[in-house]
Image: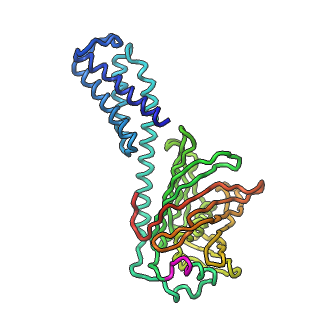
Amino acid sequence: MRIVYLIIVLLHGLIHSLGFIKGFGFKEVKELTLPISKPIGFVWLTVTILFLTYGTLYLSNSKYAWFFGLVAVVISQILIIMFWKDAKFGTIPNIFILVVAIASFNYYNFQKLVQQETNHLISQNKIIENKIINENDVKDLPEPVKNWLRNSGAVGKYFISIGEVTQKAEMKMKPEQDNWMTAKAIQYTTIDNPAFIWTVDVRMNSLLNFQGKDKFENGKGEMLIKMNSLINVVNEQGEKLDEGTLQRYLGEMVWFPSMALSPYITWEQINYTTAKATMTYKGTTGSGTFYFNANGDVTRFSALRFKGNEAGAKRYDWSMNISDYKIFEGIKVPAIMTSTWKLDEGDWTWLKLEVTNIRYNKNASH
């Protein structure tokens, strides 16, 4: 569909060159019956250049492509109105291009907003310089948590203050959905002042996609999902979401092992391979349970989370099940996992996630 759209843009742009050809008298253009002056002919050429530029920038995924598309459509439509008798059918591709350009503009604004929020989030968190995690730091933790920190390589490494996690995923929006949707995501997490911001681009099919943002900051959660960057599908805040987002933050400790030392988290050992963590931060509290194998690898995290933010929302078991690991910057972390809700009607695995890269104690890069 992307290539088809690009072809439409380029052909539509090249058709405008006919006005230039007629205006300068290079060749007779029978399709244009109305007279065209040289200055107006130059405007027709300008629109051609604008559409070709827009097509090139669109192909290269430039974040500024929308600007050239909007300008091209506006000037093109003015010319079409001036020469309505000959050019009226050009309105159809203009409408098509206008919708895509507006969606691109909204996507640009969405990404700009995310960048501003990310920069603010990171600016509120200081990197703890030259702090090495040692055995004395972990001595009061439950045995399975200590084993995990040692096995992961976190003991002996610098304390993690900020993390950037790049992900690719497959998702299902509803339990009855058959096809998986592909997605790319990036998350920034801060430890000193607990917070994260996660943004995702999801392709539903060749025509539809959505952008999502989850955020946890100052003990509050937010969720925003926009269809094709145009329509708000979800825009939620509230106490149930606050708790659920905190639990998600807690579970994602698996990528940032030094978070286990946070003063906002208390631990309770269940048995030799299981420990429960409870986090309280700025009026919001949530708990979750970590499961480990004999080697000290974390294999699963589960929590009773609210599914939904509406008044009647109920808590269900929500789990991250880990199947493989990678080493990033000397720390072994879960890299391949699934996320599952245990609902009344049965289990719903809605996410397959792969971590492709992690950077620690770096500033935002996107």
Q: Nearer the viewer, residue 246 or 329?
A: 329
92 with respect to 335 (left or right) = left
Number of callouts: 0
Residue at the far right: name it: 345
Percent position of residue 334, x then y: 57, 67
User: Can you say whether 330 is above or below 45 in the image?
Assistant: below
For the C terminus, the quadrant is bottom left
Percent position of residue 194, x then y: 51, 70
Question: Residue shown at 54%/67% (left/top)?
Answer: 219
Question: Residue shown at 42%/37% (left/top)?
Answer: 101
Percent position of residue 340, x then y: 67, 59
Residue 365, image quadrant:
bottom left
User: Can you say whether 92 is above or below 190 in the image?
Assistant: above
User: Can you say whether 65 is above or below 273 in the image?
Assistant: above
Q: How is the image coloured?
A: rainbow
- The magenta span reads 149-155
101 with respect to 249 (left or right) = left
16 with respect to 327 (left or right) = left
Residue 173 colored in magenta in the image? no
Q: Nearer the viewer, residue 216 or 68?
A: 68
Q: Nearer the viewer, residue 206 or 262?
A: 206
Residue 34, image quadrant:
top left
Q: Nearer the viewer, residue 230 or 354?
A: 354
Question: Residue shown at 35%/27% (left/top)?
Answer: 13
